[in-house]
Amino acid sequence: MDASEATVEQLLKHMGFGTVIYEPDGNTPPDFLADGRIAVEVRRLNQNHDSGDGVRGLEETSIPLWKKVEKLAHSFGPPAGQSW
């Protein structure tokens, strides 16, 4: 169970469903069966960006970019007062 599915499981229990079964039919949809009557498939919404080289998820672009920015910031060393 991934983090998104764990969040949905907590939500379903909080909503008052007495029985929440994870992957009732094995590793096929739906992800949950609530009270034997409501099927829930968990989907993560994401945004895509067409860079001209094809469509990529923003998380594919933003995570490596953020890591590069962090590495660059650390290369400056500690700040001199309130700035570099």
Image (spheres, grey):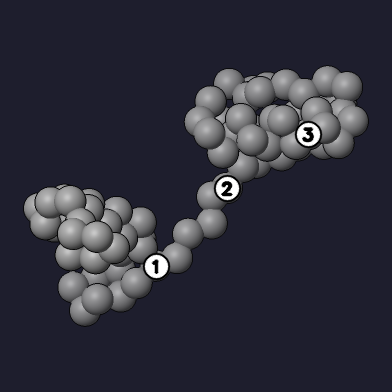
36 on left or right of 63: right
Q: Nearer the viewer, residue 75 or 31?
A: 75
Q: Position of residue 60 (x, y in %)?
A: 29, 56
Q: Could you tell whether 63 is left or right of 31 in the image?
A: left
Specify whether residue 15 is in view.
yes
Q: Nearer the viewer, residue 77 or 21?
A: 77
Q: Residue at x 56, y 31 (%)?
A: 28
How far apart, in angstroms, are the residues tagged by discs 3 and 1?
A: 29 Å
- The answer to whether residue 79 is above or below residue 19 is below
Q: Residues within 10 Å of mark 3 (few under 14, many from 20)?
A: some
- Residue 48 position in % (x across, y down): 39, 67
| Residue at image mark 1 | 48
Identify the residue shown where x is 17% and y is 51%.
78
Q: Which residue is mark 2?
A: 43
Residue type pointed to by label 1: Asn
Tell me the distance, in whole angstroms, between the alpha carbons under discs 2 and 1: 15 Å
In space, the residues marked 2 and 3 are separated at their CA atoms by 15 Å
